[in-house]
Amino acid sequence: MKSEHVTVLLDEAVDALNIKAGGNYVDATFGRGGHSRRILQKLENGKLLVVDRDPEAILVAKQLSQEDERVVVEYGAFEMLGALIDKNFETGVDGILFDLGISSPQIDVATRGFSFMQDGPLDMRMDNSQGESAADWLNHADWKEMSKVFWRYGEEKNATAIAKEIVLYRENEKPIENTAELVSIVVQVNKKQQNKHPATRVFQAIRIHINRELEQIKNVLPEAVEKLCSGGRLVVISFHSLEDRIVKNFIKEKMKPVAFDKRLPIAPDWKSDIKTIGKPVKPSENEVKNNPRARSSIMRVIEKV
Ligand SMILES: C[S@@+](CC[C@H](N)C(=O)[O-])C[C@H]1O[C@@H](n2cnc3c(N)ncnc32)[C@H](O)[C@@H]1O
């Protein structure tokens, strides 16, 4: 199946980057390059570093860099971002964009194993060239570990029952290999009609766990701010509350005055190195109507002082 990615909050995110004609920018989640292409329209003689951990996204990015010499492509996950920025820019950068989560081709193509709607190998790795797949993990994790993941990252109420059902299946039948097998196990437990597909939460939880998504976001935010020039912008689009909570708490912590000894005659002169720009932005009704996948998105913008 061929799948196009419809970019979310396209104008809003690129406007928020406040592109300078000769600036240096980073699209840390290239995907299919929707935001990157719009950044390039605004950038004259600047430079755009594009990064992704998905080899298929990197192939598309390489095509773009062949057409446009302002584009530099690097393959890697967020944990490498600081080093990749240092490698490609002598000074800091003027803006970094994170459009978190997965792209439509990752969800829609059955062989990537992210979808409970189509049968395929249970993979779910954004970078399918390395690391443990969802099937590998489900076939060795014990029920306690699985239950914790389903609850923590999916808020799945039947986390323990589903985890135990998985253990029974792999012990009595065979190792789990396909998305359809996992769906049928989950559906046996989540029998009651819900407003979402009964496997939604378990699939989300496994995906977050396998790709260490939350850990990656938590670790990259301080590094990203460090790499910004003064006046540089950080734009983050999140797709669920677990991601957005990390971004929100990061901003809150950075803006919280440092504790000082109250007995001092004067308070130390303290200023945060960031400020927030505007309020969190959500997609318009029109955008959600045209692209339902945008519905849970929320964008936060900060500027380095
Ligand atoms: C929502 S898509 C981005 C779509 C893109 N803005 C566009 O308009 O085409 C997210 C992309 O970020 C990548 N990604 C997610 N987490 C990542 C991480 N920790 N390190 C590197 N890339 C990541 C995914 O592989 C995916 O291609």
Image (spheres, rainbow, N blue to C red):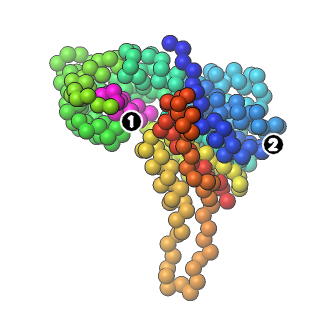
Q: Amino acid at mark 2?
A: Gly
State whether the magenta stretch is mostly helix, strand or loop.
Answer: helix
Q: Residue at x 26, y 28 (%)?
A: 193
Q: Quadrant of residue 177?
A: top left
Quick check: 128 left or right of 93?
left
Indicate the position of residue 237 as horizontal and vertical percent values.
Answer: 55, 41
Q: What residue sits right under mark 1 in the picture?
A: 209
Determine crowd level at label 1: few under 14, some 14-19, many 20+ residues with C-alpha closer than 10 A. Answer: many
Mark 1 close to ligand 1, CB under 8 Å:
no
- Assign a secondary structure to mark 2: loop
In which quarter of the view is residue 188 placed?
Answer: top left
Q: Is residue 143 visible?
A: no
Q: Which quadrant does the C terminus fall into? A: bottom right
Magenta segment includes 202: yes
Q: Is 43 or 54 nearer to us in this picture? A: 43
Helix, strand or loop for disc 1: helix
Please provide the residue range marked out in magenta: 196-211
The percent coordinates of residue 78 (x first, y second) are: 55, 39
Picture coordinates of residue 260, whole percent (x, y): 51, 76
Name the amino acid type tagged 1: His
Foreground of the two, 37 or 68: 37
Is 254 covered by the magenta stretch?
Answer: no
Residue with the mark numbered 2: 22
